[in-house]
Image (cartoon, rainbow, N blue to C red):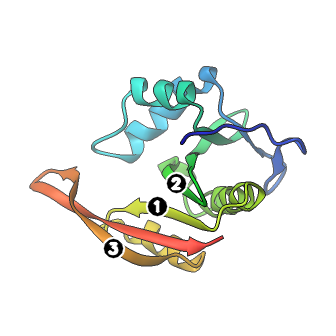
Amino acid sequence: MAGSEADPRGPVAGPAGPRVRAMRGADVPAVLAIERRAYDYPWSERIFRDCLAAGYTGLVYADGRPEAYLFLDFGVGEAHILNLVVDPGRQRRGLGGLLLETALERARGRGMETLFLEVRPSNGPACRLYQRYGFNEVGRRPGYYPGASGREDALIMARVV
């Protein structure tokens, strides 16, 4: 079940004033450019547009142009982070944590009990970030991600909201 909501309190303030806000269709080119810089196997423009059209919650951290983004889906009692990416040139500045905090806040506001995500085991920085925010490995999806030398498993991580 997908859902989208506007935050009645407006954008979330971030460090030095930039904001977390709802992703708009006009953000897709900038978000796609970040995705392509961050991943060898990026989402396509169509996937981003389909997520927005389906009503998934898309958030961007932007100071003018998007610098990080997240897609979040809500189901019955649980939420799922579908994609969380920080522009490689803006990493290690707290943007991923700010988006995680925002996702947790949105999930709590919707009455969710658990927040799930998948991550490549080879993505050490992301794994450490998720662990710092209380996520624990709860399973694996064998061969989930494409890779240069075959497929890579996904760690399924979760935390209570």
Tell me the residue at 32%/63% (across/down): 120
Amino acid type at mark 2:
Ile
**In the figure, 152 relative to 68: above or below?**
below
Tell me the residue at 79%/54% (across/down): 14
**In the figure, 34 relative to 73: above or below?**
above
- Assign the N terminus to one quadrant of the image: top right
Amino acid type at mark 1:
Leu
Q: Which residue is mark 3?
A: 139
- Tell me if label 2 and label 1 are in contact, CB under 8 Å: yes
Distance CA(mark 2)–CA(mark 1): 5 Å
Q: Residue furthest left?
A: 149
- Assign the C terminus to one quadrant of the image: bottom right
The front one of 81 and 33 is: 81
Q: x, y percentage for residue 129?
A: 53, 71
Q: Tell me where residue 27 sits by quadrant.
A: top right
Q: Which residue is mark 1?
A: 117
- Please tell me whether mark 3 sits on a helix, a strand or a loop: strand
Q: Which residue is mark 2?
A: 81
